[in-house]
Image: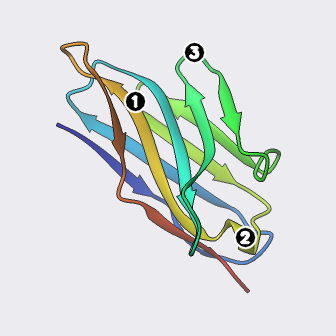
Amino acid sequence: QVQLVESGGGLVQPGGSLRLSCAASGSIFSITTMGWYRRAPGKQRELVATAISGGSTNYADSVRGRFAISRDDAKNTVYLQMNSLKPEDTAVYYCYANIVSPSYYPLNYWGPGTQVTVSS
């Protein structure tokens, strides 16, 4: 079994910063992609950022230049540094990982989500 545990959400004023963390644990051989998605009230879930093993990253246009994704593969952890936050960044943020098991079988996993609220 694999678990993703997120932390770091909360309430922040516009222009502020937050750092989200997501740690994967369990039966892991390797992790190919880790990333973050979000779902704002009344909207569909959308990609925020992904980081592929080897260093390649991808960002949604709406966060590029403000958010930064990074990985610590030794800790099976992905981070999302969020700067210059806007009210429209308010959403539940979900961690995502594509994990290869010790039997070399890849599966997608999701964390339970962490609330980020940007408001004055």
Picture quadrant where residue 116 is located: bottom right
Instruction: State which tag comes first along the sequence, 1 or 2.
Output: 2
Name the residue nearer the viewer: 63 or 7: 63
Q: Is residue 73 visible?
A: no
The 10 Å Cα crowd at callout 3, few under 14, some 14 to 19, many 20 or more, is: few
Q: Amino acid at mark 1?
A: Asn
Label 3 sits on residue: 54
The residue lying at 59 percent from left, 36 percent from top is: 50
Label placed on residue 5: none
Label 2 sits on residue: 88
Picture quadrant where residue 77 is located: top left
| Image x and y of residue 120, in percent | 73, 86
Which element carries disc 1, helix, strand or loop? strand
Instruction: State which tag comes first along the sequence, 1 or 3.
Output: 3
The 10 Å Cα crowd at callout 2, few under 14, some 14 to 19, many 20 or more, is: few
State how far apart marks 1 and 2 are (Cα).
28 Å
Question: CB under 8 Å between callouts 1 and 3?
Answer: no
Which element carries disc 3, helix, strand or loop? loop
Q: Is 85 left or right of 19, judged from the image as shown?
A: right
